Image: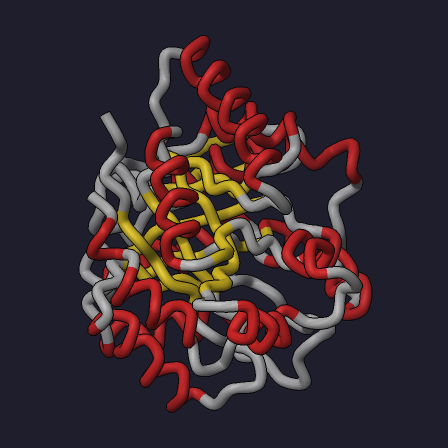
Amino acid sequence: MSMVVFFGAVVPRYDVDFRKVVDTVVMFEELGFSSVWVTDHLQPRRASRILESWTLLAALAPVTDARLGTVVLCSCYRHPSLLAKMAATLDTISNGRLELGVGTGSEPQTEEMQALGMETWPPKEKIQRFKEYVEVLKLLLSDGGPVIYEGKFYSLRAALRNTPSIQKPHPPIWIGARGRKMVKLAAEIGDGWNFYGETLTEYREAVKLFDDESAKLGRKPSKAIFTNLLLYKDDADKMEKMKHLGSHGSEQEALRKTYTLLHGTPDQVIKQVEELQERGVGLIILRDMDPEASSIKAFAKEITPSIK
């Protein structure tokens, strides 16, 4: 039996003003998307200006009833104690609508931190440090008395849990993971796993690892996938929309480098979504590189009604 799938949409943050962002979020909700998401970059190379993700998400809470998610926060940017306070506050502001996606950070995010003079995590420490990071988040987002925690990288000295979240025991924590070690860690500590990658073949391999690891641990975390969307009617429409993916050489290289796992005609994309359903994906988060969101609009009108 196929998993019931929900669809989320990524909020545009690059080279747009706030009014445009609000209008887009309202449109996403009207199109039937159950959640809206922000990515987490401070100075991406392809944008001349950008709105900070967490501040933006808080500002969007009053303008939509959709769930609010991060896809995904770079842990290096914010200490877990601070992020726990921010997450609990946003969960309160939104009356329990936060979806908290976190990860260790990508290569572009590492480049951004270096450019801004921020401390990066040594590669050999990333897995253990991130595991502690999530442990601290869960402790501080849950109800209870003062927290004492002693890890290799983080220590808490009777930290107060004085901003309880609305969702119990805490907002859902999605682990953004692609490599083998992180996928296995997502199976161990995540409420959900959010995959991003270059091809559906890569996902098929990763989901088998995730399912096997989850079964060994006796856990059943949720599964999501984050992908760019390229939906077209014919070759002419395809070539026009390919422009929004940027210059990456060949067509296949452009699709791969921009994490565009869902692409094709409506019939082709329906089959791709159905495969993801069969593999247990319950949430598909879509990003449209077109500022006018033409693929997302077409997806909502032509594909969503066909997905059971």
From this viewpoint, is residue 14 visible? yes
The quarter of the displayed image where residue 247 is located = bottom right
For residue 190, above or below residue 270: above
The tally of labels here is 0
Determine the residue positioned at 73% across, 73% down: 45
Residue lying farthest to the top in this orientation? 216
Quarter the C terminus occupies: top left
Relative side of 132 to 109, left or right: left
The quarter of the displayed image where residue 65 is located = bottom left
Determine the residue positioned at 66% across, 79% down: 47
Q: Position of residue 193 (x, y in %)?
A: 45, 36
Determine the residue positioned at 49% across, 52% down: 262
For residue 68, above or below residue 64: above
Foreground residue among 12 and 140: 12
Foreground residue among 235 and 56: 235
Q: Position of residue 10 (x, y in %)?
A: 43, 65
Determine the residue positioned at 43% across, 50% down: 268
Quarter the N terminus occupies: top left
The quarter of the displayed image where residue 163 is located = bottom left
Q: Position of residue 306 (x, y in %)?
A: 23, 51
From this viewpoint, is residue 82 visible? no
Foreground residue among 7 and 301: 301
